[in-house]
Amino acid sequence: MNGADSLCDTLLANDIDVCFANPGTSEMHFVAALDRKPRMRCVLGLFEGVVTGAADGYARMAGKPAATLLHLGPGLGNGLANLHNAKRARTPMVNVVGDHATYHVQYDAPLTSDVDAVARPMSHWVGRISDAASLSGQAAEAIRVARQAPGNVTTLILPADAAWTDLPADAPAPVVVPQEAPKAPDAQAIRAAAQAIRSGQPAMLLLGGAALQGRALAAAGRIAQATGARLACETSNRRIERGITRTPVPRLPYPVDQAVQFLAEVRQLILIGSRDPVAFFAYPGKVSKLAPKDCNAIQMATPEQDLAHALEWLAEELGIAADAPQLRAPDTNVAEIPVSGKLTSSAINRITAHLLPEHAIVCDESITQGRELAMYNISARPHDWLQLTGGAIGIGLPLAVGASVACPDRKVVTMQADGSGMYTVQALWTQARERLDCLTIVYANRTYATLHGEMKNVGVQQMGENARRMLDLDDPSLDWVHLARGMGVEAVRVDTVEAFTKALQDAFSRKGPYLIEALI
Amino acid sequence: MNGADSLCDTLLANDIDVCFANPGTSEMHFVAALDRKPRMRCVLGLFEGVVTGAADGYARMAGKPAATLLHLGPGLGNGLANLHNAKRARTPMVNVVGDHATYHVQYDAPLTSDVDAVARPMSHWVGRISDAASLSGQAAEAIRVARQAPGNVTTLILPADAAWTDLPADAPAPVVVPQEAPKAPDAQAIRAAAQAIRSGQPAMLLLGGAALQGRALAAAGRIAQATGARLACETSNRRIERGITRTPVPRLPYPVDQAVQFLAEVRQLILIGSRDPVAFFAYPGKVSKLAPKDCNAIQMATPEQDLAHALEWLAEELGIAADAPQLRAPDTNVAEIPVSGKLTSSAINRITAHLLPEHAIVCDESITQGRELAMYNISARPHDWLQLTGGAIGIGLPLAVGASVACPDRKVVTMQADGSGMYTVQALWTQARERLDCLTIVYANRTYATLHGEMKNVGVQQMGENARRMLDLDDPSLDWVHLARGMGVEAVRVDTVEAFTKALQDAFSRKGPYLIEALI
């Protein structure tokens, strides 16, 4: 038994039994240790962005962290973009990053870099194993912090010699840390929120994080129904329980002007696991803070607090019974489902929402093309909806890997913009390798549509050669059917409503990875 | 004219006229400015590792930096692995990374991160534009540092408001900085090296960086021929001039035991643009420093010094005439060229070296399978050989993009291991988009062969399920023909010597991107 065994045992003793991995030489002792622990499920990604994105998707659905295994500074670097998304989602995650043996660092070998410095910007907590004997306690601390509500990204740097050093036969058992409860809500903040709702001024409950699930969402639905207070959620959320049986919560729009208009009437803005809303980007002459200046913002509960408790308490404070009716999507909101003609993003969104199987998990990296999905999925069968939380594109396909590993019996549907999908396209291979029940729908518009919009925003109406060649993906066109097959995933291309509908029905009647390239 | 225009003008005024780019919203003003400067060649990568690897390949061949354009912390994060390689290669490069408008950072919008902190570990120099008026001077400083011999990776952070702020009509012209000369060699160090060679003890000249090109390499060849001193180069080098007309310089082997044996007889180790050699990784019971303990190491010239001048001076000091003969590859070293049978990595290496066209540029990320290429390419037609300098895999295909943009009239041949190739596979699309004359040869062994060796090194002879599933790529097998076609690159699969030879002859008789998947 060596340090690497001790680390594996500590992860397993704390119920972390999935490791998304892309190891290198400095992690070989850890791989050898994993090989001695068949209880640990090891999932290989062919690129580190797949690994970190998958760990994010796993934890969003499993409600507990996965481990990742990454190789030195550059391997961690490749995983940073999706760590950024996980950090913004407050996803619990324990990254194990190998480093050179402690005595070897001084020689500045070619793969040497400051791993701690690479980790810090995208981690809530960074630790470095000092030696094999202290390893279990240090790993347990990383796990404890990762699991603190609502979740934290922790990065544990593992020098190779700490991994390979033998421990005595009578070394202590792995350190186990209890799951800590989230912080209790604050009575004064709850009363302030209740007063704001009772004030008669237009009030909005802005929900974030865990407020969009289970008891919390149900309580919010009862409050909205009973008081007429508007509900909304942040633009990007780690997990929304969605569909016909759930209270529909509109998303704050992404475009600044629409977001300002969305909030224009609000005078009492009650923040529940969310933050005072700000624009994704700054633009000349536009605001950064989106709520009206004369709007009163109340932080009723922070993401660290027990949001279900907070919302139930608020309902009680407002005199709403536990069995009072929840707000539901109006029946009249059922969208018209197109049956023929040229395929459009709107048709994709409507048909997918209409056919979505119960308990599906939707991984949404549809960017511009899927924005109106929110209008239709409120009347879909009940499902979970996972979003791009940090704006770092390339999360859709990896997120699906992790969600499917966490929930193997549920259909995972990735709504994938083509430009974004290319960043971590290697995730398709892991879907095939692990026989995951993942359907990918690619909105193949062959352009960075977001950036076309943004060019107009900066006043460019007529683009020249340089701009067009940086914003368009049509020369050559990406062929997603070939890309998918190259990684062992069956795929089909469609460009009509009829063919898309049929492909989707096929996909929902089968198991395993599949990809539909939807030309729009 | 705004700050973004000023930055473009400063780049162009300093002869930086290629920009590898993957922009986002915060860089739209810069894109709009590029659109007004058709002299700037903009090359899109569909992933940031493509962008930074291409800038590396470009500068290694062009001898001057390219610019890159990256989007915020996560975009820079995606580019870090190949920035690490560039930093180790001492490649000149000017990265422009967009950030939020200065006044917007305080609101911690979803894509906010500490861009400076992300940049620092893999940059020699990091600067942040303070405002549009100071921009040109600050950009010129980034360019000056990047071009200091032997080259530096500089990262310039561009807040969106610095880019969009208008400058007065009478703003000063862009700041131009002269190319600084490399540092002069040190007379005392040269004399010490000459004395070491004259001592009669076994001496080795260990060449690095610019010592492997042109006048420097020729002088080293004359010294070796005249004195019998051994030549060698570091394991990983940014550019080696190679082939039948050039002095052959053996590479220090990668495996520790072989490297130790390679150096065992050396008593006088003369470092010329190189460092006292160390093991790539530490292993239990093996050394970190590779040279024998009783070997005298002399730093004759650092990478910052004029290595051609240093080696010519050493030759002169040793009384060797400027027209004395250089060491050449022995005629007997011409390898046997297989003509039929099952394809092996050895056959790929021999046949490719044999058929390689004159002035080809070989981008080498062959890892285990191409190690013996060095035995054969000494008798190939004269060519340039670019290597993986920092050990961060995923550089082969992007390096080829940049080399081909720098040298459009030369055939670029990428020797690509399959596992490594997947990290930045998106580079194939840029090869197609730009119609680059790039041939990729994929050694398709469907495994991380390096790691199989390393597992043996850590004492694992019989691998279990977890280890095999982290080291093998055969379930499913990657299909490189489909992957290439998915990105617009023609491709063929071969598994015999006859078919490989024919495919290679075809590839060398045509122009444009092409890929050979060589099953071994």
Image (tube, coloured by chain):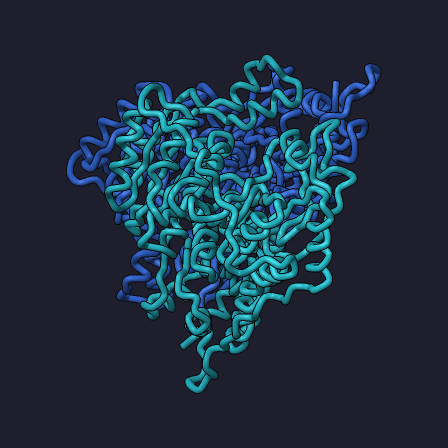
Chain colours: A blue, B cyan
Relative to B226, B43 lies left or right? left
Residue occupying the point 56% across, 58% down: B153
Q: In the rendered view, does B405 fall on the left or right side of A345? A: right
The total number of labels drawn is 0
- Left or right of A338, for residue B332: right
Residue A171 lies, in percent from the top left, at: 82, 19
Image quadrant where one finds the C terminus of chain B: top left
Measured as percent of width and height from the top left, residue B356 is found at 35, 41
Q: Residue at x 50, y 33 (%)?
A: B371
In this rendered view, identify the residue nearer to me: B251 or B107.
Answer: B251
Above or below residue B70? Residue A393 is: above
Q: Residue at x 21, y 40 (%)?
A: A343
Q: Is residue A430 visible?
A: yes
Image location of residue B437, percent across then percent down: 30, 47
- Quarter occupied by residue A124: top right
- For the residue pair B218 and B121, the one nearer the viewer reads as B218
In the figure, residue B496 lies in which quadrant? top left
Front residue of B2 and A282? B2
Provide residue B122's location: percent of width, then percent of height: 59, 52
